[in-house]
Image: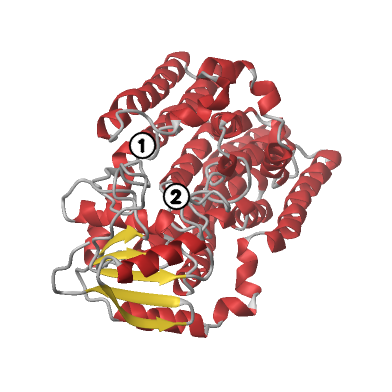
């Protein structure tokens, strides 16, 4: 009888203390919150330093930092995002559908500088670590939270994004991180709420939202999932077939041709997709590296399928810039694979089986190992290079020449000099994009320069936006146009130093 009474008392105490234990666990997690934000703060500093030093050393470009700054500057002045670097009267909403960047307009109005965009991007990319690290800590333990934070934070996809100017993809990364975390915790409506703004970030991300909906339809409320799929597909069709052509000078979605290429049609491209996804080798290498950052453990979770839309359009594209590991195209894939990693390892953390626990530790160890192996090959290694912290005579000369250009002037500038001026001048690309979508005038000649100033840098040779050797104005042609500006169009030499040339249009009228 006493034993029964004692057992009842113990069970009663256990029932009483269970909520207390839950409250204690929640309290401990709240104490860890500064650690997650500490990771975010540390990564923000890293990203800001890398991108900031690149800009200070003239390694950013008009394509794309200057273009996006012109768009945000226009938004901050309550104008349409017309970007002179892309062409006369060129509306950037006819290029890609990314009204989300207008969110930076109030900040830019307070601080009109390219650093405003670079630091905003650093903050957005760093913010994504918070939901991922928090989920990993709750599901796998505090050590795993640090591994996920480290693996995501210095992953090659994020590094490549930080080291290539500013892009709208920065908005998608934290949105996806929060949405995927909600999916992993079966908070379906919250996942959709975080995913819906992707429609305002870029036209292809509607397909990523559709993938989120497909996952919900399979794992959760079917109606909600199907509705999300429909919203994602409809959003992509609306932007690519209606909104983008309406804002484009050509009346079409310019990037649709990359999915057709020499196949003749999108349908033919889809039919040959299995072969095209494997050749050339660059595509396969990119896919392998995307999965390798988690030691391929992400393949064990269906969450990894949310990466398929982004990988799909990139591998089907006929543009070789979309295939590799450079630029910003892999940024949205990093939160996907790390969310899949957490989901795949969660069952192993819920058991006391020693073998399962060993597997958990080995998987996390593999993630750290791969991250460390890849780190020197991607741009975060710049922080350890002496050249990153040394300002060269060439950079000093460029700053001196650029300081002579007055605020409000119209300037034709080399690609790497353009973003140094876009905050205070109207900048076009030298020799220029005077007609939307065209590099030459009706007679097949480069356009007659009309800018107040011309500033040109012959080091390094221009190669973007087209691959080296395909740039319509190779260095020799640029120098010829520079000479023609003085000989034919009445520009006078203001200064020339270390491969840099500054010309000013004479105030008196001239004839051609």
> Where residue 74 sits: x, y (%)?
22, 53
Residue at 32%, 70% (x, y): give it. Answer: 487
Could you say which quadrant of the image residue 396 lies in? bottom left
Residue at 73%, 60% (x, y): give it. Answer: 372
Q: Which residue is mark 2?
A: 170
Residue in the foreground of this view, choosing between 76 and 182: 76
> Where residue 261 sits: x, y (%)?
54, 27
- In this rendering, which labeled residue sits more in front, label 2 or label 1? 2
Is residue 445 shown above or below 202?
Answer: below
Give the numbered dot on residue 97: none
Left or right of 431, for residue 508: left
The crowd level at tag 1 (other Cα within 10 Å; few <14, some 14-19, many 20+) is some
Q: Which residue is mark 1?
A: 197
Is residue 119 shown above or below 63?
Answer: below
Residue at 56%, 18% (x, y): give it. Answer: 218
The crowd level at tag 2 (other Cα within 10 Å; few <14, some 14-19, many 20+) is many
Could you say which quadrant of the image residue 484 lies in? bottom left
From mark 2 to mark 1, how far is it between C-alphas?
Answer: 13 Å
Q: Secondary structure at mark 2?
A: helix
Residue at 54%, 23% (x, y): give it. Answer: 215
> Can you see residue 187?
no
Of the image marks 2 and 1, the number of the one nearer the N terminus: 2
> Where residue 416 sits: x, y (%)?
44, 65
Residue in the foreground of this view, choosing between 502 and 165: 502
Q: Secondary structure at mark 1?
A: helix
Q: The N terminus lies in which quarter of the figure?
A: top right
Instruction: Confirm or deny contact between disc 2 and disc 1 (CB under 8 A).
Output: no
């Amino acid at each position: 009888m006493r034993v029964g009474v004692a057992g009842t008392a113990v069970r009663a105490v256990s029932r009483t203390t269970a909520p207390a234990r839950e409250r204690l666990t929640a309290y401990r997690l709240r104490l860890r919150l500064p650690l997650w934000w500490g990771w975010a703060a540390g990564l923000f500093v890293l990203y800001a330093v890398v991108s900031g030093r690149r800009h200070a050393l003239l390694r950013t470009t008009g394509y794309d930092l200057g273009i996006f700054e012109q768009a945000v500057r226009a938004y901050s002045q309550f104008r349409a995002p017309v970007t002179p670097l892309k062409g006369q009267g060129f509306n950037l909403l006819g290029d890609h559908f990314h009204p989300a960047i207008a969110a930076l307009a109030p900040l830019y109005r307070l601080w009109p500088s390219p650093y405003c965009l670079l630091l905003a991007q650093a903050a957005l990319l760093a913010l994504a670590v918070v939901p991922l690290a928090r989920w990993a800590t709750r599901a796998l333990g505090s050590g795993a939270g640090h591994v996920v934070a480290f693996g995501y934070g210095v992953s090659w996809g994020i590094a490549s994004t930080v080291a290539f100017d500013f892009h709208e993809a920065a908005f998608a990364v934290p949105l996806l991180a929060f949405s995927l975390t909600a999916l992993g915790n079966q908070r379906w409506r919250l996942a959709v709420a975080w995913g819906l703004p992707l429609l305002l970030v870029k036209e292809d991300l509607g397909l990523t939202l559709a993938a989120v909906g497909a996952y919900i339809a399979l794992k959760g409320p079917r109606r909600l999932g199907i509705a999300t799929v429909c919203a994602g597909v409809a959003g992509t069709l609306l932007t690519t077939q209606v909104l983008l052509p309406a804002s484009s000078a050509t009346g079409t979605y310019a990037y649709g041709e990359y999915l057709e290429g020499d196949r003749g049609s999108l349908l033919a491209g889809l039919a040959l997709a299995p072969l095209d996804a494997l050749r050339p080798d660059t595509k396969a290498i990119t896919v392998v590296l995307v999965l390798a950052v988690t030691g391929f453990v992400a393949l064990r979770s269906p969450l990894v399928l949310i990466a398929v839309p982004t990988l799909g359009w990139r591998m089907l594209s006929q543009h070789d810039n979309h295939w590799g590991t450079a630029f910003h195209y892999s940024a949205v894939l990093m939160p996907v694979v790390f969310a899949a990693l957490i989901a795949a390892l969660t069952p192993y953390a819920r058991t006391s089986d020693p073998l399962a626990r060993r597997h958990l530790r080995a998987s996390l160890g593999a993630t750290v190992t791969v991250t460390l192996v890849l780190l020197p090959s991607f741009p975060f290694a710049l922080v350890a290079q002496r050249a990153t912290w040394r300002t060269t005579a060439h950079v000093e000369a460029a700053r001196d020449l650029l300081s002579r250009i007055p605020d409000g002037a119209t300037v034709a500038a080399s690609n790497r000099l353009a973003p140094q001026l876009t905050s205070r001048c109207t900048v076009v690309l030298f020799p220029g994009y005077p007609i939307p979508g065209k590099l030459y005038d009706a007679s097949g000649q480069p356009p007659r320069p009309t800018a107040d100033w011309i500033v040109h840098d012959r080091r390094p040779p221009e190669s973007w936006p087209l691959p080296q050797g395909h740039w319509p104005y190779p260095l020799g042609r640029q120098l010829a146009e520079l000479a023609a500006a003085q000989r034919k169009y009445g520009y006078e030499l203001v200064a020339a130093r270390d491969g840099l040339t500054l010309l000013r249009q004479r105030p008196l009228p001239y004839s051609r």
